[in-house]
Image: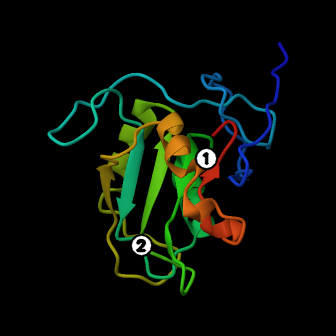
Amino acid sequence: QQQQQQQPQPGIAAYEPALPPPPMHLPLSPVRASGPKSPGAAQATGSGGASPGLLAGPKTTVMLRNLPEGFSRDALLQLLDSQGFAGRYDFAYLPVDFDTLTGLRHAFVNLLSPADADDLRRHLEGFAGWFVPSGSVCSVAWNDRQQGISSLVERYRNSPVMHESVPDECKPIILVGG
């Protein structure tokens, strides 16, 4: 069965992970970016109980806090891939200080399923094995403002971060097939 590739969202960069994604994910959303022709996923259903102040429903979007100083989006993607999450996430964004273009030490990642999100939370909570010198200890929390790829795309679609003057490496990224 041949999949039909749709056009990328304007201004949202595409990334091809270093490792091919596992073939178990099925396309669930029309939100796509250019990249390898492998199955992709978006908002999934499943686990993740609601806490006070959090969005109800399945949880797939996490916030990583206490990243090392100077961490970049590429470093974030390298970290996720090297820790066994290649092919298991479809969105990543590391906000930057636009005066210095340095990372703000936190990031948002959307996983393909609640199980993947739970795995990432368990794996990276307390993580300190950075490939750069740092005493930072990562903490992981549910994103309490947006959950799922559709919500994230809607949030950033018309954001100033998507302006053509902003370097691509400072923008959110959507990944096809995780």
- Measured from the top left, where is residue 14 in percent x and y? 73, 51
Task: Say few, some or many: other residues with alpha carbon within 10 Å of mark 1 (under 14 / 14 to 19 / 20 or more).
Answer: many
Along the viewing direction, whichever of 59 and 123 lies nearer the viewer: 59
The label nearer to you, 1 versus 2, is 2
Q: Estimate the x, y position of residue 84 in percent, counting from the top left.
A: 54, 48
Report the label total.
2
* Residue 120 in view: no
Q: Give the structural element (helix, strand or loop) at label 1.
A: loop
What's under tag 2, amino acid-wise? Arg
Closer to the camera in the image, 102 or 89: 102
Q: Secondary structure at mark 2?
A: loop
The answer, for residue 75, to whether it is visible in the render is yes
Q: Residue at x 53, y 58 (%)?
A: 93
Q: Residue at x 63, y 60 (%)?
A: 162
Residue count near mark 2 (Cα–Cα under 10 Å), binned few <14, some 14–19, many ≥20: some
Name the residue at the top extreme.
1
The label number, if any, that marks residue 86 in the structure image: 1
**Screen quadrant of the C terminus:** top right
Q: Position of residue 2 (x, y in %)?
A: 85, 17
In the image, farthest residue toward the left: 52
In the image, residue 171 sits, relative to residue 58, either above or below, namely below
> Which amino acid, by three-letter code, is at mark 1?
Ala
User: In the displayed structure, would residue 57 be above or below residue 81?
Assistant: above
Measure the alpha-carbon separation of dots 1 and 2. Answer: 21 Å
The quadrant in which the N terminus is found is: top right
